[in-house]
Image (spheres, helix red, strand yellow):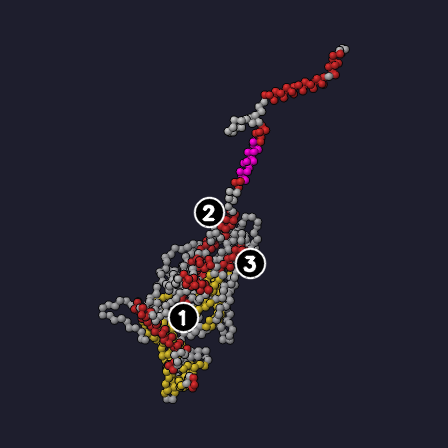
Amino acid sequence: MAKGPFMEVLEQHVEKILLGVCLLLLLVAVGYWGLASRRSVELPGSRSEKKSTPAEVDQQLQDLAKSVASAVEAKKADVPPPPDYINQFRLLMSGASSGKPFSMEAFGTPARPIGVTEGPAVAKINLKELLDLMPAPGKPVVNAVRVLPNRPMERAADEMVAHVVAVYPWQSLADAWRDRLRNSGVPFAPVAIGVVAQVQERMPDGNWSPPQEVATVFQPTSDVQGTPIPLPEVPAYDGTNAGYLARLRGALEDPAWQSYVLEPNYWQVWWPGYGWTDWRVNLPENEITKEAAATLAQTGGTVAPGAPQPPRPVRLNKYGEPIEEEAPPAPSGPQPLTPARLAEIPAPKLPAVPDISQQVQAGAVLVWFHDGSLQPLKVYRYRLAVKFLNPLLGFDNMVKQAAFATEPAVTTPFSEWSDRVEVPQPTEFFLVAASESVGEMKGKVTVFTRSTGQQVKERFNVVPGQVVGQVKDIQLTNPANGSVGLVPVDFSTGAIAVEFRLSRYGAGGGRNVVEMLYLDEKGNLQTKVDINSLPHTDREYQRYKELEQKEKVTRLAAEAARAATQPALAPGQSPSPPPPP
């Protein structure tokens, strides 16, 4: 069929017609949506009734977000940082915050020391490193003195005792261990568990004997039964006893135990005219007591003879737990004489000794021991070391070798040796008269010695070749109970009379005096002059008068003790006779 002119034109322009129709439809749609759609909205929660376009809404939301961000940044400065829980936990485990080691027993789990910290791995610890950091005690000071101790004995008798004291640099050790054990979880607070004391004796050739360990004295009346409180034995760590070791460490840290270990008590001693007195009247002077005395002087304080005793430790059972006991009876106080007689007797003076807690806080601690095995005329010297609880005990996960965590104790180096201490002979004698019979001269001597806490004297006739002094029964008062009885007293001096002769004494020819030639206890030839011919300024004469005064004072004190302990007399009953002068 033939196409007409109209169809040809339509075919030629169909694409343009379709494009135009599409454009027309697009314009209609745009117009419709532009006129019919909502171009503004009302923001929910807005206090304004004004509507906003979507573009305005976007801007408002963006502004609000910036405002909130600015407010958050401004508030950050006012919010405190979170607590340092990790560091607090480490301090809890090490015991630095409370002074006691951390134990999980309170939370129902086995008490095993915790040695693992959070964060980077801690280097394993070598026990030798801790040993090398331990300082030695200071040079000991010694006071050797003859005393009558207030302890049970069949017969009251004096004994020679050496009180040896040194100062230990406690803070230096604590600081050194803290630096090495920092952040390890291992406790670094030192815990003393013993004192090692050694003595040497001067030999006749002038050399010193090999060191011997001293059997130190612990007062046996520290508990109710009158027997020593045993020092707890610290066992080795075996992998199963960590709980016991933790409890034991906590108990031994108590100041009472530390005082018992480092500053053991000694029996009260008899002080003529004042009765039983604290043994520390004989404590050697040292830098800590000097400083404490200076502090007391500044504050106007004093130390009385009846000063309180050191704290008494609590006895522990086999599980390291405290045993409840009654407190021991208080020690008897001083028993002074009447004021008239007291004027002749020097009063005891106690040194100022801070308690162990104050010493630890100050950074230096007194360490002392007592040696009751001294022999007259011998020369000794002492040194000591302090034994501490091994800080690594039980921390097998923190050590380079397992053996470092099993060893119970570590010991400091020994101190240097003390100055030499010469134990004097308890007897001294003086020539008081001489006479001649059948062409031979003989002398009369007065011998002084100590017995049952008293200065006593006796006179002996001596001829050439005879030993000066001997054992003799003397009627004495027992200070402990006031009883009077014959007591064998050893007046032996070890000297042997050689000759009595007349000699010239004094300047410019002087005058004739009786002189005694004798061998002393060491075999040396010596002389003595009649004491009555010496001037009062002579040292020998002054020593004789000093001992006479001591003898008089102790006799008066014995009378006072007898009077204080003697029961009341029945009507017509006579008191027991006093000992002869």
Q: Position of residue 198 (x, y in %)?
A: 48, 67
Q: Amino acid at mark 1?
A: Arg
Q: Closer to the N terminus: mark 3 or mark 1?
A: 3
Looking at the image, which residue sits at the far bottom? 439
Q: Which mark is residue 129?
A: 3
Regarding residue 540, the answer to whether it shows in the image is: no
* 122 is higher (above) or lower (below) than 542: above
CB under 8 Å between discs 2 and 3: no
CB under 8 Å between discs 3 and 1: no
Q: Amino acid at mark 3?
A: Glu
Q: Quadrant of the C terminus?
A: bottom left
Closer to the camera in the image, 202 or 421: 421
Q: Amino acid at mark 2?
A: Phe
Which range is magenta?
60-73
Seen at 52% across and 40% down, the residue is: 75
Q: Position of residue 432 (x, y in %)?
A: 37, 81
Q: CA distance from mark 2 to mark 3?
A: 34 Å
Neighbourhood count class around disc 2 (C-alpha, 10 Å): few under 14, some 14–19, many 20 upward: few
Q: Secondary structure at mark 2?
A: helix
Neighbourhood count class around disc 3 (C-alpha, 10 Å): few under 14, some 14–19, many 20 upward: few
Q: Which residue is mark 1?
A: 146
Q: Main secondary structure of the magenta part?
A: helix
Q: Position of residue 441 (x, y in %)?
A: 38, 86
Relative side of 37 to 10, left or right = left
Seen at 56% across and 36% down, the residue is: 66
Q: Secondary structure at mark 1?
A: strand
Q: Closer to the N terminus: mark 2 or mark 3?
A: 2
Q: Is residue 70 magenta?
A: yes
Neighbourhood count class around disc 1 (C-alpha, 10 Å): few under 14, some 14–19, many 20 upward: many
Looking at the image, which residue sits at the far left? 571
